[in-house]
Image: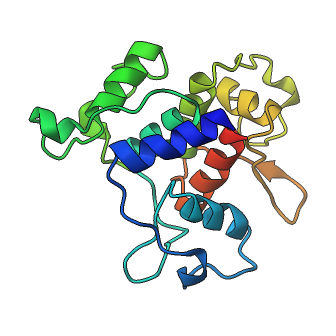
């Protein structure tokens, strides 16, 4: 609970987020959407915001910068000052990147400032999240629940109950690690990290 309150306070005070749209105003998130509750809670709690037109764009991509900042805050890392104030235009999350490098969440060869505005994929979010939570990598992929991944960080997050992948009609479960992470998926991950 303390981590949740600190996270929300940091977002409200330090990050200058706009007042979020109320859940009822998210015109593009039907009640039967698989992440309806998680998206609405994230919006209501001020973690993420909807758009001024009342949409949330649940299938919209998430940048490395957005994901890095939100995962670090959800995992209890301190908020960082906006880098634009330090003369780094367009790279507002550069201080989060530096903090992540210093904490061993990413290396400077894995992510550079020029990567911050690129869409994050599911493998990268798994690595960032698992390392931010200081999870032990699962190095034995022989029992992977995913037909397409034996990645140690993906398996660590699965073991921690944070990700489950997608089970297709055939009954086979996939992680789809190279696909871009969506806003809906990020809300689900944030909620599980915070709980």
- Asked if 51 appears above or below 156 in the picture, the reply is below
Q: Residue furthest left?
A: 87
- Vertical arrangement, residue 22 with respect to residue 113, above or below: below
Q: Name the spot of residue 150 as percent of width and height, x first.
A: 73, 30
Give the quarter of the image for residue 38: bottom right
Q: Is residue 44 left or right of residue 87?
A: right
Q: Is residue 99 left or right of residue 9?
A: left
- Residue 149, x across and y down, in percent: 71, 36
Q: Quadrant of the N terminus?
A: top right
Give residue 62's position: percent from left, percent from top: 45, 54
Q: Nearer the viewer, residue 114 or 184?
A: 184
Nearer to us in this view, 73 or 33: 73
Q: Is residue 92 visible?
A: yes
Q: In this rendering, would 112 be left or right of 35?
A: left
Q: Residue sitting at 25 percent across and 39 percent down?
A: 82
In what quadrant of the picture does the C terminus appear?
Answer: top right
Location of residue 13 with respect to 132 vertically, above or below: below
x%, y% of residue 191? 67, 48
Q: In this picture, is 154 found above or below 23?
A: above
Residue at 48%, 44% (x, y): give it: 9
* Residue occupying image coordinates x 50% and y 72%: 56
Identify the residue at image location x=60%, y=82%. 24
112 left or right, relative to 172: left
């Amino acid at each position: 609970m303390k981590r949740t309150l600190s996270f929300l306070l940091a977002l409200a005070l330090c990050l200058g987020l706009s007042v979020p749209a109320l859940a009822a105003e998210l015109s593009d998130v039907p009640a039967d959407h698989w992440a309806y509750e998680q998206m609405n809670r994230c919006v209501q709690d001020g973690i993420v915001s909807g758009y001024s037109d009342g949409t949330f764009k649940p299938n919209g991509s998430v940048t490395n910068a957005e994901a890095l900042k939100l995962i670090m805050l959800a995992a209890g890392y301190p908020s960082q000052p906006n880098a634009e104030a330090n003369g780094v235009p367009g790279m507002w999350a550069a201080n989060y990147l530096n903090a992540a490098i210093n904490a061993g969440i990413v290396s400077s060869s894995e992510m550079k400032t020029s990567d911050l505005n690129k869409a994050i994929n599911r493998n990268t979010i798994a690595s960032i999240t698992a390392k931010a939570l200081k999870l032990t990598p699962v190095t034995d992929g022989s029992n992977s629940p995913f037909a397409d991944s034996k990645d140690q960080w993906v398996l660590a997050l699965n073991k921690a109950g944070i990700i489950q992948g997608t089970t297709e009609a055939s009954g086979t479960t996939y992680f789809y690690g190279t696909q871009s992470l969506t806003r809906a998926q990020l809300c689900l991950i944030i909620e599980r990290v915070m709980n």
